[in-house]
Amino acid sequence: MSSRRVVFPSVPMSYSSLHKSFTVNSTFVNGNRRSVTGGGLQSFAILDNSSFIERELVRDLLFIFQGIDGKFIRQKKDKSYEILAEASAPIRELALKLCELGHCYNKIKLFKEKPSAGTIIQSFKHGLDLELHEYYRILADIKSQIQESTFDTPLAEESKSREDITLIKLGICITDVRSRLEILACVVEACSPEISTTPVHQKYGGELCSSIHLYTEHGDPVIKSLAVSLLTTVTKPLYLMLGHWILYGELEDPCNEFFIASDKDCRKEDLWHSKYHIRGKMLPSFISMKQAEIILATGKNINFLRDICNNSTGYEGRAEIKKTIEETPVECLFMENDKLLSNAIQKAYRTTSDMVLKVLIQDSRLIDHLNALKKYLLLGQGDFIQYLLELLQKELAKPVPKLYQHNLSAILESAIRATNAQFEDDDILRRLDTRILYGSEKETGWDVFCLDYKANGPIGTVLTEDVIVKYNQLFNTLWRTKRIEAILCALWKNQTTLFKYQRSIMPEIGPVLHQVQLLIQELIHFVHQTQYYIMFEATECAWDSLMVNVNKATDLDEVIKAHEEFLSTIMSRSLLDIGKRELLNQLRAIFGTVHKLNDFLTAFDERVTAEVISRRNLKNQINETVAQKNFFSEYVTQAKAEVEQLHTVSQDLVYRFLIVLNGQQDSDSITLQCLSFRLDFNEYYAQRDARLSFPLTYLSRRLSFTSVNSPLYQSIHTSMNLSHSAVESNGLPVSFLRQQPIQEN
Amino acid sequence: MPCEIITLQLGQCGNQIGFEFWKKLCLEHGVNPEGQLESFAKEGVDRKDVFFYQADDEHYIPRAVLLDLEPRVINTILTSRYSKLYNPENVYLSQDGGGAGNNWAAGYGRGTGLHEEIFDIIDREAEGSDSLEGFVLCHSIAGGTGSGLGSYLLEKLTDRFPKKLIQTYSVFPNQDEISDVVVQPYNSLLTLRRLTQSADCVVVLDNTALNRIAVDRLHIENPSFAQINSLVSTIMSVSTATLRYPSYMNNDLIGLISPLIPTPRLHFLMTGYTPLSSEQEATSIRKTTVLDVMRRLLQPKNMMVSTAHDRNAQQRYISILNIIQGEVDPGQVHKSLQRIRERKLANFITWSPASIQVALSRKSPYIQTPHRVSGLMLANHTNISSVLLQ
């Protein structure tokens, strides 16, 4: 017995409690005896025969074993037993010990009688019933033995000579059944709060299975077999549910006992993502989480095919799997040595997953849709985007309240018709639409416009609304970059024509133009390199790995995961995640200077054109006043200063952008290094700003090699400190760290 | 459709390279010599309308204007199997057929007389396109028609279409041979002046270098005009590949040349192409990767411009655009860039930020090439001055 206590933590608890209840009250009042025991035992009243008492106690115990109070032994309100007969201490002790069985029985009985819902709990009760039947049989057996002894020898004196059923004997008779009942009582106690002495909540369903499963690994073969047979009964409904789920994807679980739950209010679009989930609590301990996920996925696959793809024909090999499930004994569920069932589940999972992937990739052409997203929402189809940009220019300059969806959609239509997008599949074009993001009244169309992609049907499972929103954000960012590129191109073109013009008519604006050209060139370089970076390092690389992963994927979840990875990679590399807010702001600031430059040049152009016209008019009269001439030359000087200032500002912004870029210290810093490397390929910026000569990652790498006291480190350190404090103090990088650009040509 | 480009072919040389160029384009787009679309070319990945437009019967007509003062070359074209491709109204031959006699002044002077007729054609073409992006001019700077008439046209185009871009593919004369035309240097000089002033972008095709490449790289003893012209047409077609096969960037002429040309005067570009292979020699096929291609593009021997090979000279790249075609692993591009920077394979100017731009372009699906990756470099290099000096 002591060895058992070691094995099961719950056993000593109950034992000690039992003991306590037996030992607390063993005193009795002698005077009461007669009134309680009644007159039937008059003849023995004078005899204080221990054997007689013992016999009576045995008889009583049989009642106690069935939960009924006996003549001399009865259960008190606090559930402890008392013996109302005078008996010697050893006998009393022995009898009380045997009462424990009655205690166990009472517990089980109580549990059984308590109403409870749930098929698994019902089958548990059924299992208990079977056990109790056996128990009753044994009790009846003992009883008949006792009766035999009393009937055969009506005289009490004679019976002494015969073999009596003593307490010890009774104890031996019930040893086996007692240990069984003890275990059952323990299980029952663990499952039900009413019975337990320690606080537990009502267990049901898979949880119940888990607590029984614990005993199947018991060292005692008797208990082990008991637990196995009990568990077999208990898991029967679970097994049926499982079979139904795997074969038909249906949950027949009115009492929420199965380890897979469904959300009835779930929308059809979210079927895959949120309709079904695993109830961790209900997961029996003999089914691993991994296996549960496979089971979940199988049913999800079936439901997906039926509800989303309207394909309810059932999968190939279902009959076969059904047969396997029907033929396999229930024990397979929790006995690890048999792989038959898990193989069948695996097979169902494979087949259904393949079907889902086939529907998704071949029938719904997921890859084509992804490609379309890349082409239209990630600006891959350059000619279309460019034309759209051109057409939308006027519309998007309006403030948000004046934007109308139908105007934008009409423009989108014409852009599609005019470009290569017209060759695109109709299904894809139908899904493409414009969308106005939420924006305040002050913002213009540029801030809120984006393209949208309607992903309904099976592909909606991969391209959920959240995913599309992310695409929208990406589009908006890339679109802004594209717009800046378009502005710069237009400026460049204007400059080129103006340059031809200037040479013949107005040589004095030459220096301004030169300065403007340099600035434009720098900005063009910046924007182009940023775009190349987004195209190669962000989109294309991520796309490559997406394709690899999708082709490798064995089920829908893997496809979804691959796509999510793809998106988050692009988001993070396009500076759109939260950690890179600062960088994005810097980038926006640089774009801001482009707008400023654009405004400036428009004004400048107007001024110059006006001057040209007035000069042409004046040519005939040749009396242009000195004041007028001076006025214009003043304007030119002023304009030159303005351009120079713009140049400085934009360069400062680029410096700061690069510094922040180099300072990025997360998983993606390697790819961000690519951007800084592209932007500063010929070390133009690095040569002019000491801070950029030591990118932080290199610095930290170097630090690990050089000791802290080395002069190299100190020089770096001071230079870092210097520049840092300078930035802090006046908000702008110190200019002495930079030389003025040398203009060679 | 935005961004149409009209090609003007001038003179003997211009028409020859133009002819090769159109041949190549037709092959790439799956257009047969009659202008009909081949049955296999139904996919819509390419933009044919940049260089072609469709006639009423759906056959494709190049946006090309053929001009010459003597009928020899154009007649060859018109008798070839491609004769039905061109719009006959766009072919202009001088009535007297005398040619410009390799004389710049003659060509230029004839222009004044022919102004009306030529611009009729050009105007008609320009009106036929929705949003004309610019003109491409093919000519040689040494001859008579190409240089003289070309110069005249350049000036007039700038006046007439001040907002349109003008890109020229100008063939520079061979320095190694002593030309039989004594006025060649003068022709060149006079044309160069117009190119500097009026054109927006000049792609220099140096006959010296082309010959050298043909001899050294392709192992052809005496390269014929046709062979050299096929080199030229390759360059022309690849450099317009991004326009014809749209992708992320560089989808129009301005997007292509604006990052290359920092200030309007610095608009002479040189080109390089690798891997080069001739039809006779299939054995020289090498394994090509992005790095290989990008590295080879920076080698002077692959440059189509013969510059003074003085490594010590302070000659630097102003900007580089590599157009890579074929199956490219995008991850490799960055590695290649890094390698080039580490080894300092390319020297850049120091007065402005500059870097190698890499554009990926699709290959035509209808042409099989032995190489997996091929690349073209358009570079703005200070060294071009040495060519101009000659």
Image: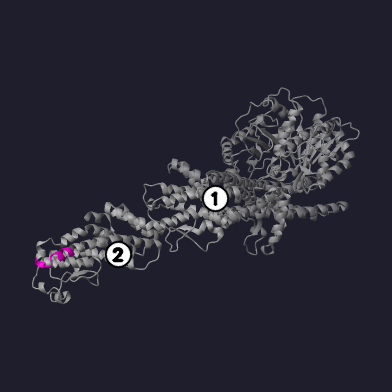
Q: Nearer the viewer, residue A365 or A574?
A: A365
Image: B219 above or below A510: above
Q: Which residues are magenta?
A: A147-157
Q: Is residue B110 magenta?
A: no
Image: A68 above or below A276: below
Seen at 36% across and 55% down, the residue is A232
Mark 2 nearby-residue class (10 Å; few <14, some 14–19, many ≥20): many
Q: Dividing the image into 4 quarters, which one contains the N terminus of chain A? A: bottom left
Position of residue A380 in the picture relative to residue A728 (left or right): right
Amino acid at pointer 2: Ile
Q: Nearer the viewer, residue B21 or A562?
A: A562
Image: B194 above or below B221: below
Q: Is residue A152 magenta?
A: yes
Residue B203 in percent (x, y) is at 73, 37
State the residue lying farthest toward the top: B221
Residue A341 in percent (x, y) is at 42, 49
Chain ID, mark 2: A
Seen at 15% across and 65% down, the residue is A150
Question: Mark 1 sits on what residue?
Answer: A356
Question: Mark 2 sits on what residue?
Answer: A108
Question: Considering the numbered disc 2 on the image, is that residue within a helix, a strand or a loop?
Answer: helix
Q: What predominant SS class does the magenta segment belong to? A: helix
Residue A47 in percent (x, y) is at 8, 71
Amino acid at pointer 1: Val
Image: B310 above or below A535: above
Q: Nearer the viewer, residue A44 or A50?
A: A44
